[in-house]
Image: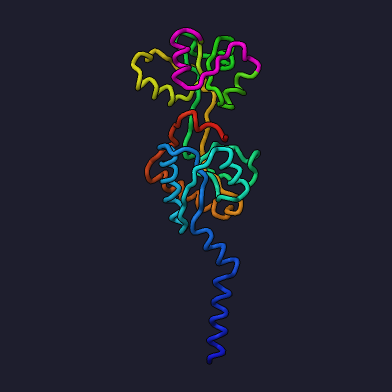
Amino acid sequence: MAMIAQYQILFLILALTSPIVLAKEAEQQLILGQVGQGKVQQQAFSILQQAYQQLGISITTQSYPSKRSLAMSNRGDIDGELLRINNITTQYPNLIAVPVTLYQVKNAAFTINGIAEFKNIKDILQYPVAIRRGILWQERFIHGHTSHVIKAQETNQQVELLNIGRVKYIIASVIDISQFQSRNSSVQNIRQVSPIIKKTEFIHYLHQKHRHLIPQLTIEIKKIIAAINVQPLTVPTVYCETH
């Protein structure tokens, strides 16, 4: 009987230290890279936290500079990215998208006294335009038309250039301009130009070692969004970039 008990204890030790059990234990908490500490990140964390809880997993975040966070997630040093734009897997092939849109940003041109409707939105580049410095997609949009472009550091500088007539159009996110107008009653005459230039979706990413979690996680996120009747929210331009 003593020999049987010893074998039982040995079997239990081996079972508890087997790769399968250890992998399961490792999945009880995931560390996600996060850029910024704003309301957008808080809301995304809340949704994902509830979804992961349904899988018996807790999550925590670590804040890093944007490029560093992506590199760490891609290497598997951390478990994924809390919230990033869609379509980054070409550059970061080890990151697997969880295919549910959590947030959305719409970007457009704005004017005070210019034409407000174009068949081809790039026709605004015939006129002086102000963009945000460092926003990569805006740099790509104006490529080849830089003679009419002024680069501003912030949205309020773009609006000032528009207000004093230095430029005919500015390019910004819809919510950035809406928020700016809510704080400044003197610029209510700014009009959005049609069509929208760019719409960007934001989703959650996991390192490929957690690929097996994605089908059920996707279901749980969709359930939570449906339960609270949340549509993808618009977020400021700063969140548009992958890095």
Residue 46 visible to an observer of this rendering = yes
Residue 112 vs 40, above or below: the answer is: above
Q: Is residue 100 magenta?
A: no
Q: Which residues are magenta?
A: 144-166
Residue 100 visible to an observer of this rendering = no
Question: Could you say where residue 36 lies in the image, as x and y percent from the top left?
Answer: 47, 37
Q: Is 160 in front, or is 120? A: 160
Identified at 61% across, 46% down, the residue is: 74
Residue 23 vs 141, above or below: the answer is: below
Say left or right for 178 vs 218: left
Question: Could you say where residue 116 lies in the image, as x and y percent from the top left?
Answer: 48, 13
Identified at 54% across, 71% down, the residue is: 16
Residue 40 vs 5, above or below: the answer is: above
Q: Is 60 in front, or is 199? A: 60
Identified at 43% across, 48% down, the residue is: 223
Identified at 45% across, 55% down, the residue is: 58
Say left or right for 77 vs 231: right
Q: Residue 18, located in which quarter of the rendered image? A: bottom right
Q: Is 9 in front, or is 209? A: 9
Q: Is residue 165 magenta?
A: yes
